[in-house]
Amino acid sequence: MPQNAPSVALQALTEWWEEMGVDIDHTELRALSAQTTPQQTPAKPEAAQAQSGDVAPAPRRRNKSKSLHDWIMEAESLAAAANDLPSLKAAIESYEGCDLKKLSNKTVVYDGTLDAPVMVLGEGPGGQEDRIGLPFVGKAGQLLDKMLTAINLDRKTNTFISNVNYWRPPGNRNPEAEELAVCRPFVNRMIDLAQPKVIIVAGGVAAKSLLDTKTGIMRLRGSERPFETPAGTRVPIFPMFHPAYLLRRPQDKSRAWRDLLLVQSRLAEMGIDL
Ligand code: URA
């Protein structure tokens, strides 16, 4: 059956967005295309739809069967019980304390080399990651891989890649404070188990969350920041622009390059040749 005009336009628009680094949820897109025919009136804004009862408003917070404190405690005990990275991955997959899980297809935990000297932490999965189940596999991930390759880093030999949140937020919004808080015990444990020599943090959301600061990425990047997990793992953090931002602002790639050179020289100082 030929596609109708709105769905062709929608597809063209979202392909263009994807080109520019926006992660598109193709499941949502298919549902939207199915709803929209030339005869139908345009979709109502979300708030109006929710009011009229057409669609349930997307849940934005934790599973309310426990308090936030209790969900964090549960994350801490699951994380503490994991003695290696694969068991931690299984623990995160079994965890029900983040409602983003209900809205996503996959729990996206990590990719790369388990005993790598370099860990990269991003903000959370986008559309492609949610479909495939691995971090940084969309357009931004492809740019990240190229940037890492420029200083001899890659997933197969010396780099471990994860995020500070394991489930895709709807519409690729930023993860909220509570969503980050329930994931944090797993992030800390991941750092304790992986024992990276340095952590590259991609983007302001992840950098601000890990460093517990309101300072933006423009000021955080460009230098090394000390970081310590509650269990005492100390590792320098190198905040860097998110590759999705660099796709939109390629003129800032030279600053990202300087940040990568900083990582490379810190590793050399530690006696790690790439
Ligand atoms: N952006 C992120 O921060 N992480 C991913 O895994 C993908 C896109």
Image: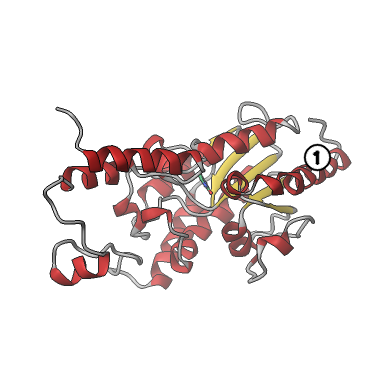
Name the residue at the left extreme: 39
| Residue 80 appears anywhere in the view | no
Q: Quadrant of residue 193?
A: top right
> Which of the 4 image quarters holds residue 149?
top right
Q: Position of residue 102 (x, y in %)?
A: 29, 53
Regarding mark 1 in the picture, which secondary structure is present there?
Answer: helix
Q: Residue at x 24, y 65 (%)?
A: 57
The image shows residue 70 at horizontal and vertical percentages of 39, 69
Position of the C terminus, as image quadrant, is top right
Along the line of sight, the residue nearer the viewer: 81 or 136: 136
Q: Name which residue lies at 74% across and 29% down.
A: 152
Front one among 243 and 166: 243
The CB of the residue at mark 1 lies under 8 Å from ligand 1 = no
Report the side of 41 relative to 182 (left or right). Answer: left
Residue toward you, 107 or 203:
203
**In this rendering, position of residue 89 left or right of residue 264:** left
Provide residue 244's location: percent of width, then percent of height. 56, 47
**Which residue matches tag 1?**
264
Residue beneath the point at 59% across and 44% down: 247
Q: Is residue 258 left or right of residue 141?
A: right
Query: Considering only vertical position in the picture, is 221 above or below 93?
Result: below
Above or below, 53 against 15 in this view is below
Given the image, on which type of amino acid does mark 1 rest? Gln
List x then y, in percent, for residue 171.
Answer: 38, 54
Label count reads 1
Q: Quadrant of the N terminus?
A: top left
Label 1 Cα crowd, 10 Å radius (few <14 / some 14-19 / many 20+): some
Q: How is the image coloured?
A: secondary structure
Left or right of residue 59, residue 230 in this image: right
Residue 181 seen in this snapshot: yes
| Residue sitting at x 18%, y 47% | 36
